[in-house]
Image (cartoon, rainbow, N blue to C red):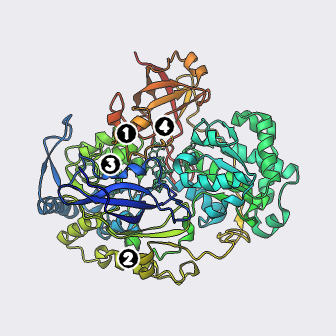
Amino acid sequence: MTAPATRDVLLTCPLDCPDACRLRISLGRGEDGRERAVKLTGDADHPYTKGFACAKTVHYPARQNHPERPLYPLRRVGKKTDPEPRFERVTWDEALDEIAARLRTLLDTRGPSTILRYNYAGTMGLMEGSHVHALWRALGTPELDETICATAGTAAWSMGYGARYGVDPLDVPHARLIILWGINSLSTNSHLTPQMTAARRAGARIIHIAPYRNRTSQYADTHLKLRPGTDAALALGVMHELFAQGWTDEAYIREATQGVEELREAAREWTPERTAEVTGLTVEEVRDLAHAIGTTRPTYIRVGYGMTRHENGGTNLRAVTLIPALTGDWRHRGGGVVLSTSGAFPLNRSRLGGAHLIRLDAPHINMNELANALAPAAHEPGGLGALIVYNTNPAVVAPDSARVRAGMVRGDLLMVVLEQAMTETARLADYVLPATTFMEHPDVYTSYGHHWLGHNPAALEAPGEARPNTWVFQQLARRLGVTEPSVYWTLDDLLAELLDTGHPYLKGITPGRLKAEGSVRLNLPDGFLPYAQGADTPSGRVQLSPAPQHREPQAALTADYPLRLITPPAHHFLNSTYGNLPHLTRAEGSEPHVLIHPADAEAYALADGEYALIASEVGQVTRRVKVTGAAQPGVAVVEGTWWGLSAPDGTSINAVTAQTLTDLGGGSTFHNTRVRVSPLP
Ligand SMILES: Nc1nc2c(c(=O)[nH]1)N[C@H]1C(S)=C(S)[C@@H](COP(=O)(O)OP(=O)(O)OC[C@H]3O[C@@H](n4cnc5c(=O)[nH]c(N)nc54)[C@H](O)[C@@H]3O)O[C@H]1N2
Ligand SMILES: Nc1nc2c(c(=O)[nH]1)N[C@H]1C(S)=C(S)[C@@H](COP(=O)(O)OP(=O)(O)OC[C@H]3O[C@@H](n4cnc5c(=O)[nH]c(N)nc54)[C@H](O)[C@@H]3O)O[C@H]1N2
Ligand code: SF4
Ligand SMILES: [Mo]
């Protein structure tokens, strides 16, 4: 259908992934004369992307040209509870006039608190992903606390260190010990791999710490299969040995930290024996880990958000991040710990997304509690009359998803979904508004895994009548009589403001240069060593107090719910993105599986290849069992937030996960679910 490629463009990947790759995309003309993407790979000249895209995004052209992609505004015909949704094509004017009229009525009769924007990181673009909230802030709708992914980690990091700086990934080849702690980096941060391989060639050892064996464990030299949710115990066990064996860097502790005595006291009880008992590791494994960390400089620790998705996930992550403050690794190039590099982008965000419009008295809604927020009917106190969804697929990715869907199909709720794909959320909408992709709209990008800023021009004409989110909201704003200027900014307006800080890291980076070069490295000082002299906290020191403590979850395992279910990302999907591409679902095994250890298979009469019922206190799903030693006794694993449409029972795995929040940051607890797995009757 599509002719051979005629030209290449270089663009930054917009997806929620630390790598923010520079992509080389080949365009060709179809029979209809329209240019489209035909091939995608990584830019060979980019020092971090190094010429390859991941196993999922190489298929972005198929996603973009998907036959079911919505290309025209659609209005529902029939009821939201109909088993097969039906939509009719309408003009943009019809859709926008009708939506604006419904919003106007809600604003006039019941006020802005009845309208909820619901969004996440479908695009990381600062325009289409962040600035686009300005309309809702100008209207004074509830503040959505964007907690589904990173806030437990951010809160934990900021207690110890303040802003999130991280080791430059290009310094990783200097490390001699690499610890991948609570992250499946070969799947979720794949461009770190060449850097680690370079370190390995120079003699580095690589350790993976995660409850089940996956690609990253296989790549590592050592896999420590700890019990989920016990990272604080393991970190304290390591610290016990650092203190006991004299492996601490006393100069660093004295000059750059505060609270070491409290931490030393807390670590005292975490002998290797006690640590082994709590974490499920052997005493030798605990001693070996501590010895490796204590005696190897530089030690590089890459922590993932994965380990935070537990009740005590914030504290667990904080405990791990404090280790380099005891070893002094921050003073060694390639040493330290990384959660995110995003703090290094010193942009002027004072009006980004209408930040200056946020009202102090605005109600807040935690996005993990969408099921609750949708529960009261529109006429009840606190009831929502409208839900405006963009850059996210909550019917699949939000916890307690069956109740989320039940709330969405309420007849009195206006639901508008801006989408690039006919997701299960879009299928529940009153209006589906076709959205452009990163190749079809201009935007700017930071990264949470490296230090380049990216700018994408609109490289392709939008197909059909797809429009950027910002265009849609500006059209609504006009119809609602909104006069706030920032709502109407173009990307050039935003870019000028973002770069206007005078910060040394942005020196020489003008809008013109960024647009001309496309990808520009921040002006970090030579030998960038964040936290070598202290931290970005009020005291200027790394804050070790209050000392982290291990705690068992309130959702303790019981005879009724004897297994802990973790639901980490799949290699071939990005959250639910790509879950509608058959060659990627096939690569993931065609349907979601639950990994069960042979000992549990025997205990609960589960047979390999058979269907089983996974039941939690929240709900239940049916999944095919894979009996495998990759799991551990007591832990069930379902990889990937598959579309419910791919599952035997049509449900998302989040039908069993709960709205429980983390100890810090109000974060999600997707790996915290206690379940019972039984053969399907
Ligand atoms: N292929 C792919 N890449 C992705 C994504 C995707 O869905 N697929 N999602 C993107 C997004 S949005 C994010 S936030 C990042 C997330 O990427 P990561 O930061 O890697 O976080 P998770 O993927 O949630 O974590 C997965 C790992 O955490 C481990 N884990 C679970 N519980 C615990 C625990 O208690 N302790 C320890 N030590 N380990 C634990 C799992 O075994 C698994 O190895 O990846 C991004 N990249
Ligand atoms: N059980 C379980 N659940 C999880 C997780 C888990 O590990 N386990 N991970 C959680 C995590 S870390 C995260 S970050 C969330 C992520 O959840 P989401 O943010 O919902 O991510 P995606 O599922 O990738 O859906 C993004 C949607 O945005 C759309 N989109 C992309 N770009 C644009 C655009 O420019 N405009 C518009 N209008 N739409 C666009 C895409 O088509 C896609 O449907 O899921 C969470 N849910
Ligand atoms: S690795 Fe991440 S940033 Fe790179 S192409 Fe894949 S999803 Fe995009
Ligand atoms: Mo995420």
Going from N to C along the chain, the mark reached first, 4 or 3, is 3
Going from N to C along the chain, the mark reached first, 1 or 2, is 2
Q: Which residue is mark 4?
A: 639
Q: Residues within 10 Å of mark 1 (few under 14, many from 20)?
A: some
C-alpha separation, residue under disc 1 versus residue under disc 2: 38 Å
* Vertical side of 571 occupied by 333: above or below: below
Which residue type does callout 4 highlight? Glu
**Callout 3: CB less than 8 Å from ligand 2:** no
Q: Which residue is mark 3?
A: 62
Q: Nearer the viewer, mark 2 or mark 3?
A: 3
C-alpha separation, residue under disc 2 versus residue under disc 3: 31 Å
C-alpha separation, residue under disc 1 versus residue under disc 3: 10 Å
Q: Quadrant of the C terminus?
A: top left
C-alpha separation, residue under disc 4 versus residue under disc 3: 23 Å
Contact between labelled residues 3 and 1, with CB atoms less than 8 Å apart: yes
* Vertical side of 517 occupied by 641: above or below: above
Which residue type does callout 3 highlight? Ala
Q: Which residue is mark 2?
A: 494
C-alpha separation, residue under disc 2 versus residue under disc 4: 38 Å
Q: Which mark is residue 510?
A: none
Going from N to C along the chain, the mark reached first, 2 or 4, is 2
From this viewpoint, is residue 253 visible?
yes
Secondary structure beneath dot 4 equals loop
Contact between labelled residues 2 and 1, with CB atoms less than 8 Å apart: no
Secondary structure beneath dot 2 equals helix
Q: Residues within 10 Å of mark 2 (few under 14, many from 20)?
A: many
Q: Position of residue 200 (x, y in %)?
A: 70, 51
**Callout 1: CB less than 8 Å from ligand 1:** no
Q: Which mark is residue 583?
A: 1
